[in-house]
Image (spheres, coloured by chain):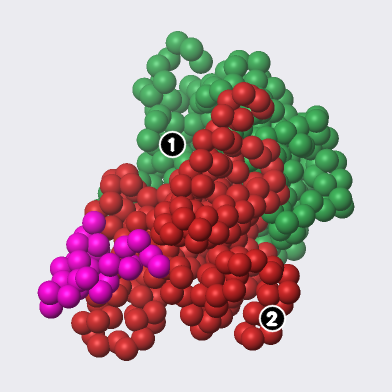
Amino acid sequence: MELIYDIMDKLMPFEFMKYTFMKNSFLAILIATPIFAILGTMVVNKKMAFFSDAIGHSALCGIAVGTVFGFTDRSLSMVIFAVIFSMLLNYVKDRTTYGADTIISVFASVAMSLGLVLLSAGGSFNKYTSYLVGDILSITADEIAFLAVCFVLVIIFWLLAYNKLSAASINRTLAKSKGINGQVLDYLYSAFIAVVIMFSIRWIGVLLINSLIILPAASSRNISYNTRQYHLFSVLISLVPGIAGLIISYYTSTPTGPVIVLLLGSIFFVTFVIHSLVKK
Amino acid sequence: MNEEKEMPPVKNGCGHHCIKINNIGVSFGSEVILEDVSLHMHCGSLTALIGPNGAGKTTLIRALLGEIKHSGSFVFRDLKTNEKLDMKVGYVPQKLDVERELPMTVYDLFASFISNTPVWLHKSKKLYNRIYEQLKIFSAEDCIDRQIGKLSGGQLQRVLLSIAITPIPDLLILDEPVSGIDDNGVREFYRLAGEIKEKYDLAILLVSHDLDMVKKYADKVVLMDRGILCQGTPDEVFADRNFTQIFGGGEA
């Protein structure tokens, strides 16, 4: 880690990079935003924005359940919970005649409320408020290492499964005729999203996490024609505002997460206008 | 074995490959969607599947592709050697639910179905050329770099046909397009289906809504409503009592 810090000092001799917490946050953003951008492309294509939102909301419930069962490692209880929750969501979604959005809303609100009730039962909800809006400046070197592992796993998954996932999202029956099992992939993909969200919830927060997933992909969609552009722009649109947001929040003493989301939102509107003007 | 006896005369194709659908049944909970569906198909012949809405035509196809649970079995055999073979199935859906703005070109779509080269990372020249050649079969090669949401109904049909016959299947299942395509498009669709049948000597199962076209192109017609009501040549089926009951007598 010291080595990375040294390299960062050499490469970026700026005032704001003097502090270790800024270096950590910078690294975290560098690693995490592309993950969200990449996973987000498919969330937007598959119209799963509600789904990822629900997973984010269930994080509170994950923490609560972990606390109740006496898990010392809160991350572990959150991950286990997220995977189970996402599997359950997927299962119910496949087996109901209700709209998927209705089912997902029901799950999300129940999970979030359960989390709030359990956490505040001891009258101590205040110490969990950082999970709502996140606190990126508090990220530790260990958590960055965790994120890096996630990053590698997501890239491997994407290299191996993206084609099949995309094929199944276009038409499941057609995919099946080519020997692609869309259902299994859906479960895997949901689990991936769930785990990544859980790892990031502490420093992005329940309320902001979905914008990091949806906004880059949505903006990128406005200006791309093919899958490669879609991914490239999506990664750039998450990386640049991510880092810019960190720097701006440092100089203006504003919370980092919301600043990043505001930047992402502005970019979305810019691309939206470009899209309507170009009428590609 | 009595397969030889059951084999109907086949005009085109070698007629030595037989696909048997045996006693297929599908139910969701207590609701029976399909009951005891059995039929035979041979290479080089076009079987049209007709029936009222909700007759279970799409369900049968999804069962055939192994997408939903069903009872009964599908067997694909070489009648000369009586050997059981693995059946490759090609499928053309009725339509694709894609948004106009979806950032996905025909190349992306095609590649994601037939290859593992990650389409998000890299456009393979070799794969591109292969797809170009496959699209050319249906004169759709000009579409390769266009977004799929912006193709016309007819263009999209031809792209889907190209995907379905890459690689060439033993059974090709076609779901006749009902929307986004005009009468000319429907005629073109049947013409292409006929062409594929002759050229590749494969069995085609076509879910159809256009009785005139069925009469003109089908070698065999199957009328179904949850189960099979009658099957035979177009003339036989169109004269059947069940047919007149469902579709009315006049038009046929």
Q: Disc 1 residue type?
A: Met
Residue B14 in the figure: left or right of residue B30: right
Number of numbered discs overlaid on the protein picture: 2
In green, which chain? B
The amino acid pointed to by label 2 is Asp
Residue lying at 69% horizontally and 69% vertically, measured from the top left = A13
Q: Nearer the viewer, mark 1 or mark 2?
A: 2
- Label 1 resides on the chain identified as B
Residue at the spot of label 2: A6
Q: Secondary structure at mark 1?
A: strand
Does residue A177 belong to the magenta stretch?
no
- Is residue A119 one of those drawn in magenta? yes
Classify mark 2: helix, strand or loop: helix
Q: Position of residue B16 (x, y in %)?
A: 74, 51
Disc 1 to disc 2, C-alpha distance: 74 Å
The chain carrying label 2 is A
Residue A185 in picture, x, y percent from top left: 53, 62
Q: Is residue A195 visible?
A: no
Within 10 Å of the Cα at label 1, are there few (<14), some (14-19), or many (20+) other Cα atoms? many
Q: Residue at x 16, y 71 (%)?
A: A120
**Residue displayed at 55% across by 78% down:** A20
Q: Look at the picture and state if A41 lies above or below A127.
A: above
Front position in the image: B93 or B14: B93
| Residue in the foreground of this view, choosing between B35 and B68 | B68
Quadrant location, the N terminus of chain B: bottom right
Magenta segment boundaries in residue numbering: A109-135
Rendered red, the chain in question is: A
Name the residue carrying label 1.
Answer: B224
